[in-house]
Image (cartoon, rainbow, N blue to C red):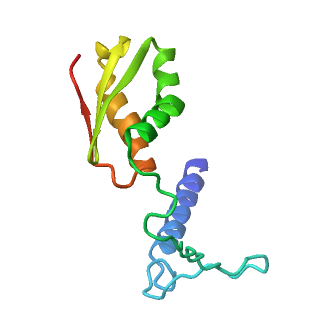
Amino acid sequence: MIRDRIRRGVRRVKRGIARRLFDPSDSVVSAAPVSAPASPFAAPPVPPAAPEPVEEEPGADVPPMTLETVEALFDDMVRPALQADGGDIQLVRVDGFDVHVRLMGACSSCPSSTVTMKMGVERLLEEEFPQFRNLIQVPA
């Protein structure tokens, strides 16, 4: 008697679920597009801001790439970091738009020296001197 009631209840639940899943008037099954209900608190969409044009004259505020300017840049930005790790960098020469350097001390045998050269020194030279071309490491 109780089993029969449970079975009937289970059948009803299954039929109700089946009706809900396969109801053709349901928006999920129908081809009608589903839209979210409008909220009275929703803010209107904000269009992305257009970037402001940067007006620069070619060559404005770009120091010439000379031995002195590169040496000053190394003294301010590169040497303190290298000397803190027991190394140093020596500027050998500036040849046109190429910079020749020699790593010294702990930096000369460090396996991360290529990363230091590429990601540190070369990137800094590219930022400071747009005309910069190559950073060349001279062997000790």
| Relative vertical location of residue 113 with respect to residue 26 in this rendering, above or below | above
Quadrant assignment, res 88: top left
Locate residue 118 relative to residue 62 in the image: left or right: left
* Residue 12: percent from left, percent from top: 55, 65
The residue sitting at 44% across, 85% down in the picture is: 30
Q: Residue furthest left?
A: 139
* Residue 124: percent from left, percent from top: 43, 41
Q: Quadrant of the C terminus?
A: top left
Residue nearest the observer in this picture, 106 or 130? 130
Residue nearest the observer in this picture, 42 or 131? 131
| Relative vertical location of residue 117 with respect to residue 85 in this rendering, above or below | below
Locate residue 94 relative to residue 41 in the image: left or right: left
The residue sitting at 56% across, 48% down in the picture is: 3
Q: Residue furthest right?
A: 40
Quadrant assignment, res 67: top left
Locate residue 37 relative to residue 50 in the image: left or right: right
The residue sitting at 50% across, 68% down in the picture is: 15
Residue nearest the observer in this picture, 47 or 101? 101
* Residue 125: percent from left, percent from top: 40, 43
| Relative vertical location of residue 74 with respect to residue 64 in this rendering, above or below | above
* Residue 115: percent from left, percent from top: 33, 30
| Relative vertical location of residue 99 with respect to residue 39 in this rendering, above or below | above
The residue sitting at 48% across, 79% down in the picture is: 23
How many numbered tags mark residues here? 0
Residue nearest the observer in this picture, 110 or 6? 110
Locate residue 34 relative to residue 110 in the image: left or right: right
